[in-house]
Amino acid sequence: MDTLLNRRSIRRFESTPIPPKTSELLELAAQRAATSQFLNAWSAIRITDPALKQQLAEIGEQPYIAEAPLLYIFVLDQRRNAHIAKEQGIDVSADGFNLASSYRFLQAQNDAVLALHAMETAAESLGLGCVILGSVLNDIDRLITLLHLRQLTFPVLGLAIGKPAQQPTLKPRMPRSMQFFENAYPADFDNEEFSQSLISFDATVHQYYDLRHADRPVAAFSAQIKKVSSAKPSRLNDIGRLAPKQGFDIRTQPEQEH
Ligand SMILES: Cc1cc2nc3c(=O)[nH]c(=O)nc-3n(C[C@H](O)[C@H](O)[C@H](O)COP(=O)(O)O)c2cc1C
């Protein structure tokens, strides 16, 4: 509970290397995570080459990626299973090959995220700090090329791990009632309780200092949502183009009769 209730992202690390015994433990913890239908549909690539770390930091536009003593890129992975299925006599190039389906793409993504989160929690329980890296997806094409990601694999997230060289305060979270509902989703958010909760959360968030920009408090939550909602379309939306290129059939299926 202490580990989970005190977790926050760490973006500055001591240069101290992480001993191999520790990384082995973290990898075992990741492998222990639950996995849909026991397909183990994820893999992780340990990035140890400094030049490659540097290239990933360029993609992410975040220098701390290059400085992380331990860095992993988690990928959703049906390739290994497709190989096994093929050995078992399955025609993996057939239309409708199940491991390439949109459902399996989604569940493989879930597998990868759960494994990454297990690794993050394990690292934090050992006093290490982590930051999850969606920024490595800024240029998925380049990431796929750099890591030689083959058919039926797709990048999910990075995880940077190291001894913390900063002690950020906990970033606020919204009042629980805004995020936990009972038995059904609320009809709408047009009510006084929600408005009041949001006003108070906006104010709390606006008092938080992100150590990346320590000279000013972060914008209120509503302002952050507004900014992201109106951001220009970016390469991050390439998944619809790139998932099929990686062999996944994420097209809309005709409605099935039940
Ligand atoms: C899917 C995902 C992607 C993220 N990508 C990045 C990233 O690329 N760079 C970064 O500095 N933080 C990244 N984060 C960390 C979030 O910014 C952070 O969790 C959030 O602001 C809350 O702060 P906290 O983790 O300190 O509580 C990511 C988090 C998640 C869950």
Image: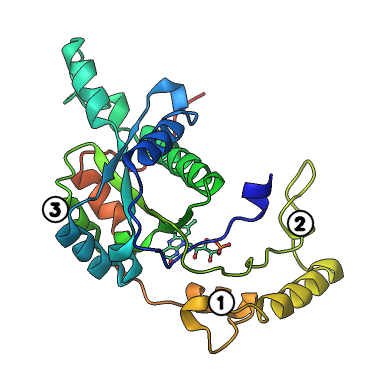
Q: Look at label 2 and name its amino acid.
A: Arg
Q: Position of residue 36 (x, y in %)?
A: 46, 27
Q: Look at label 3 and name its amino acid.
A: Thr
Among the two numbered marks 1 and 3 on one chain, the one whose residue lies closer to the N terminus:
3
Q: Answer above or below: position of 130 versus 100.
A: below
Numbered marks: total: 3
Disc 1 to disc 3, how far (Cα)? 33 Å
Question: For this rendering, which residue is in front, 176 or 258?
Answer: 176
Residue at 35 percent of width and 57 percent of height: 16
Residue at 68 percent of width and 81 percent of height: 207
Q: Position of residue 133 (x, y in %)?
A: 39, 59
Q: Is residue 254 visible?
A: no
Q: Answer above or below: position of 17 versus 23.
A: below
What residue is pinned by disc 3? 145
| Residue sticking out furthest to the bottom | 215
Residue at 51 percent of width and 77 percent of height: 211
Q: Look at label 1 and name its amino acid.
A: Gln
Q: Position of residue 78 (x, y in %)?
A: 28, 31
Q: Answer above or below: position of 49 versus 209.
A: above
Disc 1 to disc 2, how far (Cα)? 19 Å
User: Quick check: 194 left or right of 254?
Assistant: right
Q: Secondary structure at mark 2?
A: helix
Among the two numbered marks 3 and 2 on one chain, the one whose residue lies closer to the N terminus:
3
User: Quick check: 23 left or right of 46?
Assistant: right
